[in-house]
Amino acid sequence: MTTILEMRDITKTFPGVKALQNVTIKVERGTVHAICGENGAGKSTLMKVLSGVYPHGTFDGQILFEDQPVEFRTINDSEAAGVVIIHQELALSPFLSIAENIYLGNEQAKRGFIDWNKTNLEASKLLARVGLKDNPITKVIDIGVGKQQLVEIAKALSKRVKLLILDEPTAALNDDDSAHLLDLIKHLREQGITCIIISHKLNEIEEIADAVTIIRDGRTIETLDMHAGEVNEDRIIRGMVGRDLESRYPDHTSHVGEELLRIEDWTVHHPIDRSRKVVDGANVMVRAGEIVGIAGLMGAGRTELAMSVFGHSYGTGISGKLYKRGKEITVKNVPQAVAAGIAYATEDRKRYGLNLIDDIKRNVSGSALGKLANFAGFVNAPEETQVANGYRKSMNIKAPTVAAITGKLSGGNQQKVVLSQWLFSDPEVLILDEPTRGIDVGAKYEIYTIINQLADQGKGVIVISSELPELLGICDRIYTLSEGHITADVPREEATAEHLMQFMTKFREAAEA
Amino acid sequence: MTDTKKRPEGMSPQTIDVREPAANGAAAAFRYLTGQFRQIGLFLALIVIVAFFQITTGGITLQPDNVSNIIIQNSYILILAVGMVMVIIAGHIDLSVGSVVAFVGAVSGVLMTRVGLPFWLAIILCLVLGAIIGAWQGFWVAYFGIPAFIVTLAGMLIFRGAAFIALGNQQISPFPDPFRAIGSGFLPTLGDSGYEPITVIIGLLAIVSIVATGLRGRLTRKKYALEDEPIWWFSLKLVAMIGLVLLVTLLLASYNGTPVVLIILGVLVVVYTAVMGRTVFGRHIYAIGGNLAAATLSGVKTKRVTFLIFVNMGVLAALAGMVFTAGLNLASPSAGNGFELDAISAVFIGGAAVTGGIGTIPGAIIGGLIIGVLNNGMSILGIGIEYQQLVKGLVLLAAVAFDFYNKRRGGSR
């Protein structure tokens, strides 16, 4: 076997963060090489370095492709060498045909005129190689996500790919499509095409990978030979999570009271692909004074579960029941959810949380403006400022005044504004989606403290997080979510990262157990 | 009532700036002023333009009859701008208002001269018609999700066609006198010589209410122990405003008195400034324009708010249509051509953001007045219509470019 790719001592720094530190990886020709790691470990960054998204010179280290040092400055450079990356978010133009998409940017033209016969003929040959029987003139919007993934691979083949990188290729696929894709990857391996696959689905990795490199906190931890025996999912999980829990979490003892909110048999379908269940029969319950975690990998349906509960803000064909203090409630839109005492603080505060061009006080009052208004609908502006000032002090929002524009605050302070907004609506149950995403360690500690205070006030808090240590550090109980299914309900005392990761990655076994 | 548009807290909802109190005299005062520049810049621009024409026209611009004319001739654009700024803050646009002006004008003519309805009933029916037109467009935009640009482009054609149909391709004239009053009439006067007393009384009442509102705002903020703008700046603005109201009052009082339409405009500006700045409804409009997804997830009934904005625009377009028809004493199917563009220009000159979420009623009014004064001044100077268009285009571009420049510098407050 020969080495096709070697990345040596790759270090990539963003302002203030070392995303990658001396990462080294060696990929053999004609193998399927998996890269594993928690969310944010640096997998995607590494692939962007490789494919020229981060041009040569913006990182340290060396890349050898087919034993030659290479300096990719753009994606075109890397594709010309035979390295093609297929991103998690497919990059197809929905209203163009399959053939047009395959040759987009690489049109089969003579003297500036496109040769449609050649385009469609070559496209159908490529489609045959990936096992797709559709007509190449079909529009991409008319085929399912699984087939779109295959079109992406056909597109890669048209570029004479030698090294194909797949980022979470099966995250959005159903079981049949996933199985088909895995078969195709094996088939490509037989044709001598090397694959790097990034995936959270360890069962799939166990099935197809020849080697696994584990990345944690921006460093290479180890590379495992999958044929060496004794390498299984558990072994990979240990590598992924084996970090020490430092005392980054405030001490807290919860005083758990009566049941506040129960979600029963909750099923949600994808808003566009209506046949796909994004959440399937989930049961979740939170009591007064309790902090409950929901652990799940990207694409497990965490946000979808939360947003669909919060006034059907996501999904179609939602079924299931909601009980507040044991009584069934109907919550079909956001105003009803707010009235029922449910709050949802989004994972994407810039897109879904804040009006970034407006100031702190108007964002804080946003979801409960009625509380500041008189019978005629006039807002008491001075009282609003006072309220916002109160939160600015109690939450320690670092801004000169509450007239500061939220778009100019740091991530941590923006998160505190989002939390203030929902606290002002005075909910009984708060669903916090990735409350510490993208904020620094100090601010994280403050957020944890706030969460503890909320529980002490008798509120039920549901925390969704990608970071297992965080959930283990602050939650009383943790649900695991895998492919839309709740796979376990683990009390804090019994929870370990390995244990949770198992339930997060292999739902079938757990569902049967 | 004359100049309520220049109330102190009215300029801009996002400019209530409460920074640390002035540290040392002049330097701090200067820093405070630059922070306020966006707020007063537009107003200064209007004053500069008026001064420019006052000089170049040899004093004609501020002649009593000309001031009266400027108000009357721009009133319908200003009424449209009030509705348009709300539509634009919410992140939409309305291209149909010019056609709605023609259609409602036509219907008012048919109702009064052909059907023979009394003028007051015709006015009410026309306002209801405006609401229905707005509801029609609001339905497609809010509940069907079709972009407002398309819906109102269709409306532009639909209501222009409807105007021709309603009039049977003919013009209607004349209109009954009480109806004409809303377009070109004046309040009743007491005596002919010197300063007309009723106008002077209205002017004084306006001044008293401006001072009272300003002081009350300061007192409330004090009660809540909130920081406030420095007293010197407050006083300066107050004095400037009183002076301005007094000037306009005296000019009007020495001519025919108070135009009826000025009272209509004054009421609209006061009411809508309050709606946009102080009510839950108004704040929801800003929230929708600022971040639609966040507003939805905060529990704002975004569809209903959008629908109501278009209903409101329809009613105001109907009002503008009647004011225009009454002023001209003529209902014509080609009336109101291009009014939508004047109203939209006024809104953007007045500091609204193309992407929504930013804009004010007083800003749109001043923007409309800038266009109006430019039109008036250039006409007096005998500048051809081709150059007038060119200049107005450049002013619009310059105003928006200035806003973008400000934003990029980061001094966007």
Image (cartoon, rainbow, N blue to C red):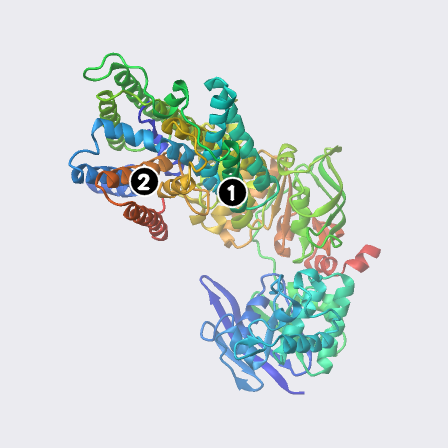
Mark 2–mark 1 distance (CA, rounded to whole Å): 26 Å
Residue at the image position 58 percent from the left and 43 percent from the top: A451
Above or below, comparing residue A410 to residue A329 in the picture: below
Q: Give coordinates of residue A168: x percent, y percent.
A: 66, 65
Pick the residue in front: B246 or B240.
Answer: B246
Task: State whether residue B308 appears in this view.
Answer: no
Say which element carries label 2: helix
Q: Which amino acid, mark 2?
A: Ile
Tell me whether marks 2 and 1 sit on the same chain.
yes
Above or below, comparing residue A478 to residue A190 in the picture: above
Chain for mark 2?
Answer: B
Q: Give coordinates of residue A86: x percent, y percent.
A: 62, 69
Residue at the limit of the structure toward the right, as seen here: A512
First in sequence: mark 2 or mark 1?
1
Chain for mark 1?
Answer: B
Above or below, comparing residue B323 to residue A183 in the picture: above
Residue B157: mark? 1
Q: Give coordinates of residue A348: x percent, y percent.
A: 56, 51
Q: Can you tell which quarter of the image residue A108 is in?
A: bottom right
Say which element carries label 1: helix
Q: Is residue A206 left or right of residue B345?
A: right
Q: Which residue is mark 2?
A: B371
Q: Can you tell which quarter of the image residue B137 is in?
A: top right
Q: Which amino acid, mark 1?
A: Leu
Q: Is residue B284 left or right of residue A327?
A: left
